[in-house]
Structure formats: structure tokens, C-alpha cells
Image (cartoon, grey):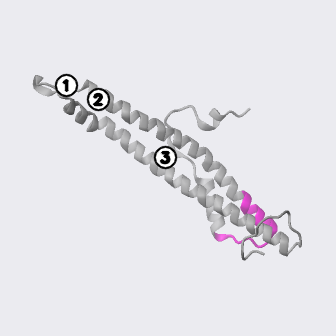
Amino acid sequence: MTKLSDLLGNELEEDFANFDLTEIQEVLYKLQFTDAIDLSHAELLRQQSLRGADIITEYLGKIIKTVGYLETKVGSTKNRVSLEYQAPDGIKTTADMKKYAGESSKEVEDILIKLAKAKGSKSILEKKYDLLIKSHHHYKDIAAGLRRTVLGYSVSSEKISEGYE
């Protein structure tokens, strides 16, 4: 039995910088330099693009979890540092001093840097996912056009993109 927690992971903060994108990069490289010359080839390219999208989907789930956790951690760390701040030399500690202490804390800055890296990584994964899904639909259109013109039948009332009929 495969549970969602098996795919999502048990850690609140994933090591997203070490996600293995080797297979995804190989799929993208193959799609870049390969033309669909016949129906089986178009179907193979369509399947490969879906496989890459499937891998990215798992990574996106983990990185979205990490981004949410880091955003929460930023707020709680700011609050903790603000509450713990005491003005030096025994002078009166003001609310503004506490606020600025929380916002300028090295600890908060480190978390914000991790958060920025996580959001950047999420953006890269989303763009690669979109590219793979668009490739899947492109090869699906090619396969439908080949079925209709070369093989002489239509699977259903599939709309075939212009140029593949």
C-alpha cells in the first residue's frame, strides 16, 4: 500500500536542493532533439513527457509543503526574537525596538534565504511541469493526426490541431 505520506515525506522541511532531476532532464533533452516520425514514436514521446510530469508532481508537493513550513517559521521566529529582545544598558525597551529586533535577526534572515531558494526551486519545477504537459498534448495531437491520416481512422471525435490532419 502506498500512502500519500510516503510520497509527501515525513519531514516538514525537505532538502529540495538535492531533488534528483536527472530523469526529467533526460526526457526534456530527448524531446528537444527527437521528432515523432510515426505513431508509435509519437506515443512513446507522449508517455515520456507524462513520466517526467509525474516525477515533478511529487517534488512539487514536497516543495509546497516546505514553502508553507518556512513561511510559518519566519513569522514564529520573528515573534520569538521580538519577545526575547531586551534593550542594552538597561534602557526602556520599546515596541518598535522589539519589532526591529525581530525583523533584523540573523536567524530570521537565514530562514528567509531558505524560503527564497524554495520559492525559486518551486518556480523552476512549475515551468518544467508546464513544458512537459504541453509536450504531452503536442504529441497527443500528432498521434491523433497520424491515426486519422496515415491509418485512416479516428479514435473518437478528438479535435486535431491544425497541421497534423
Secondary structure found at label 2: helix
Secondary structure found at label 1: loop
- Amino acid type at circle 2 is Val
Q: Quadrant of residue 38?
A: bottom right
Report how far apart the C-alphas of labels 2 and 1 lie in the structure.
Answer: 10 Å
Q: Which residue is mark 1?
A: 86
| First-in-chain label (2 vs 1) | 2
Q: Looking at the image, is 142 positioned above or below residue 75? A: below
Report how far apart the C-alphas of labels 3 and 1 lie in the structure.
Answer: 37 Å
Write the residue at 32% across / 27% down: 80
| First-in-chain label (3 vs 1) | 3
Q: Looking at the image, is 76 positioned above or below residue 62? A: above
Question: Would you say residue 26 sits in the magenta stretch?
Answer: no
Write the residue at 66% across / 63% down: 135
Mark 3 surroundings: few (<14), some (14-19) or many (≥20) residues within 10 A: few
Q: Which residue is mark 2?
A: 81
Report how far apart the C-alphas of labels 3 and 2 lie in the structure.
Answer: 28 Å
Of discs 3 and 1, which sits in the foreground? 1
Task: Look at the magenta stretch and give its main secondary structure.
Answer: helix
Mark 2 surroundings: few (<14), some (14-19) or many (≥20) residues within 10 A: many
Q: Determine if residue 27 is in view.
A: no
Write the residue at 47% across / 35% down: 69
Q: What's drawn in magenta, residue-wise?
A: 33-47
- Amino acid type at circle 3 is Ala
Horizontal relation, residue 134 to residue 147: left or right: left
Horizontal relation, residue 79 to residue 57: left or right: left
Q: Which residue is mark 3?
A: 17
| First-in-chain label (3 vs 2) | 3
